[in-house]
Amino acid sequence: MENKKSYSDLTKAYAMTQIQMEQFLDKIYADMVLNELILKKEKEKILEQIDHALDLRDKEQFFQLTNELQQLEMKFGQ
């Protein structure tokens, strides 16, 4: 016997595939948003520390922090 699926079965399977795809894309989007928030928060923190190092005229700390900022931006492609 041939295993033929009805139109109804095919429609249901397609709908489930679409739902799974939408859920997958939602997860990717949520992950992107969270990563962006983490990046912004870390960047703000480093920039505040750089400002503080400048206020104290601490060259060593300034260069260390600017290096960290550059690495962070390279890591996240900014």
Image (tube, rainbow, N blue to C red):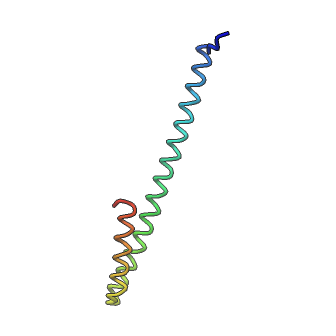
Is 34 rendered above or below residue 59?
A: above
Hey, which residue is sitting farthest top in the picture? 1
Give me the residue at 60% from left, 23% from top: 12
Q: Quadrant of residue 5?
A: top right
For the point 40% across and 69% down, the residue is: 43
Query: Is residue 17 shown left or right of residue 73?
Result: right
The location of residue 40, given as percent across then percent down, is: 41, 64
77 vs 23, nearest the viewer: 77
* Outermost right residue: 1
Q: Nearer the viewer, residue 59 or 53?
A: 59
Quarter of the figure that contains the N terminus: top right
Q: Is residue 32 above or below residue 40?
A: above
Q: Nearer the viewer, residue 57 or 61?
A: 61
Q: Position of residue 37 (x, y in %)?
A: 46, 60
Residue 30 image position (x, y, % from top left): 50, 50
For the C terminus, the quadrant is bottom left
Q: Tell me: residue 35, above or below residue 26.
A: below
The mark total stands at 0
Direction from residue 28 to residue 75 in the image, left or right: left
Residue 11 placement (x, y as % from top left): 57, 20
